[in-house]
């Protein structure tokens, strides 16, 4: 009887420590995956602007744990509305998986791989050309005093405005900043796209934001991003909610 009670207490404590860990609001994805049988919704509203153009979207990510080190993913920019020029539609759907190849701790980083394929399922000007695969390597280090450092490096295949296939890259780093028991922030630099000028050029941002853990299975977040070159929207802002089931 005592052994059973002890095991229940240990399991309850472990569950309490297993807080929700969304892949937002920063651009950099972490290597952590959903536990087998757990499902998570990460949804948001997002706005971006530059001197002339405005864009609203509803980015959403669905994650399903299928093994202790593997999750399946569906991701989309959702409903989009643009001003100057005016356009509306829905974003393409990306399907993929994340594999966590190494758990992280104070002695070693967490490591993982993220593979996704963008599919031409959107509408209007937001529909892409053909299947566009991408592969990202993810790493995260636990630093002293509750800080963390996440990095993401990847390659992708896309098509330009002339429907010509090209290969691009991305590279980002995000510093996690503890601000309290339930509150943390981040500061990030991200090359969201590294490509030649004829293929859209480089898209580079600096970002910062906050995430508030409402419960062990819910998080509210917000973030703002500043474009660092002429190919990138001047400003972007998001507010999101993540729920785990």
Image: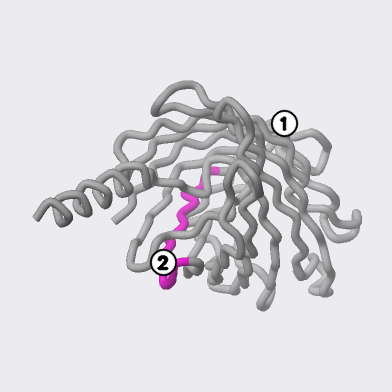
Q: Over which residues does the magenta segment extend?
A: 56-68
Q: Is residue 4 above or below residue 70?
A: above
- In the rendered image, which quarter is residue 131 located in? bottom right
Q: Is residue 19 rendered to the left or right of residue 122? A: left
Q: Is residue 136 left or right of residue 102?
A: right
Element class at badge 2: strand
- Can residue 89 be seen in the rendering of this structure? no
Along the line of sight, the residue nearer the viewer: 93 or 23: 23
Residue where numbered disc 2 is placed: 65
Image quarter hosting the C terminus? bottom left
The residue at 46%/36% (across/down) is: 239
Kindly report which numbered mark, 2 or 1, lies closer to the viewer in this rendering. 2
Query: Residue at 42% across / 49% down in the picture?
Result: 43
Q: Which residue is label 1 attached to? A: 51
Residue 224, percent from left and from top: 59, 30
**In the rendered view, would you say 187 is above or below 100?**
above
In the image as oriented, which residue stretches furthest toward the front?
2
Q: Position of residue 125 (x, y in %)?
A: 62, 61
Report the residue that reaches farthest toward the bottom.
Answer: 130
Q: Secondary structure at mark 1?
A: loop
């Amino acid at each position: 009887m005592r052994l059973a009670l002890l095991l229940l207490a240990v399991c309850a404590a472990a569950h309490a420590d297993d807080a929700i860990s969304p892949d937002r609001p920063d651009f950099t994805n972490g290597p952590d995956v959903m536990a087998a049988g757990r499902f998570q919704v990460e949804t948001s509203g997002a706005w971006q602007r530059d001197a002339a153009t405005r864009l609203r979207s509803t980015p959403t990510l669905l994650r399903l744990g299928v093994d202790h080190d593997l999750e399946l993913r569906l991701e989309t920019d959702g409903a989009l509305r643009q001003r100057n020029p005016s356009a509306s539609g829905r974003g393409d759907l990306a399907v993929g998986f994340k594999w966590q190849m190494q758990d992280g701790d104070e002695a070693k980083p967490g490591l993982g791989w993220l593979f996704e394929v963008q599919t031409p399922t959107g509408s209007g000007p937001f529909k892409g050309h053909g299947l566009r695969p991408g592969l990202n390597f993810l790493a995260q280090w636990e630093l002293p005093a509750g800080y963390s450092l996440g990095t993401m490096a990847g390659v992708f295949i896309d098509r330009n405005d002339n429907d010509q296939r090209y290969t691009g890259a991305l590279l980002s780093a995000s510093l996690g900043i503890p601000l309290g028991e339930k509150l943390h922030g981040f500061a990030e630099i991200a090359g969201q796209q590294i490509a030649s000028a004829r293929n859209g050029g480089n898209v580079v941002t600096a970002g910062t934001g906050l995430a508030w853990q409402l419960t062990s299975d819910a998080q509210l977040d917000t973030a703002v991003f500043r474009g660092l070159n002429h190919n990138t929207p001047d400003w972007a802002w998001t507010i999101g909610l993540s729920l785990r089931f």
